[in-house]
Amino acid sequence: MSLEELSEYLHVPIKTLYDWRLTGKGPCAVRVGRQLRFFVGDVHDWLASQREQQPGITSSGA
């Protein structure tokens, strides 16, 4: 999926996706020329890794 499609899918601004890439927090991408593309499976894996261990408790403990 494209950066724009990922932005729409996650309901986050494209700038947030770029920020996540700079800080290593977002899903892995593949470069196709100058474009970024995301494997749907990688996005699903990344989302699963963001899941709370218990309701209301984030992995960072905050």
Image: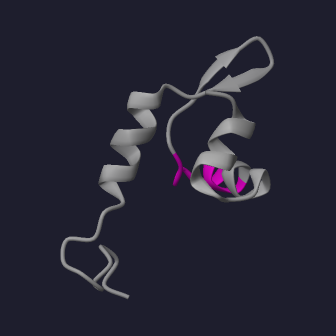
Q: Write down the region rendered in magenta.
A: 19-26
Looking at the picture, does residue 39 appear above or below residue 47? above
Left or right: where 58 falls relative to 19 = left
Looking at the picture, does residue 26 appear above or below residue 4? below
* Horizontal and vertical percent position of residue 21: 63, 47
- Residue at position x 62%, y 54% in the image: 20
Looking at the picture, does residue 15 appear above or below residue 28? below
Considering the image in quadrants, where does the N terminus appear? top right
* Horizontal and vertical percent position of residue 55: 24, 81
**In the displayed image of the protein, which residue is found farthest to the left?**
54
Tell me if residue 24 is in the magenta stretch: yes
Q: Nearer the viewer, residue 4 or 29?
A: 4
Magenta residues, dominant SS class: helix
Left or right: where 58 falls relative to 24 = left
* Horizontal and vertical percent position of residue 59: 30, 73
- Residue at position x 52%, y 54% in the image: 25
* Horizontal and vertical percent position of residue 31: 66, 19
- Residue at position x 72%, y 49% in the image: 18
- Residue at position x 50%, y 42% in the image: 27
Left or right: where 38 falls relative to 43 = right
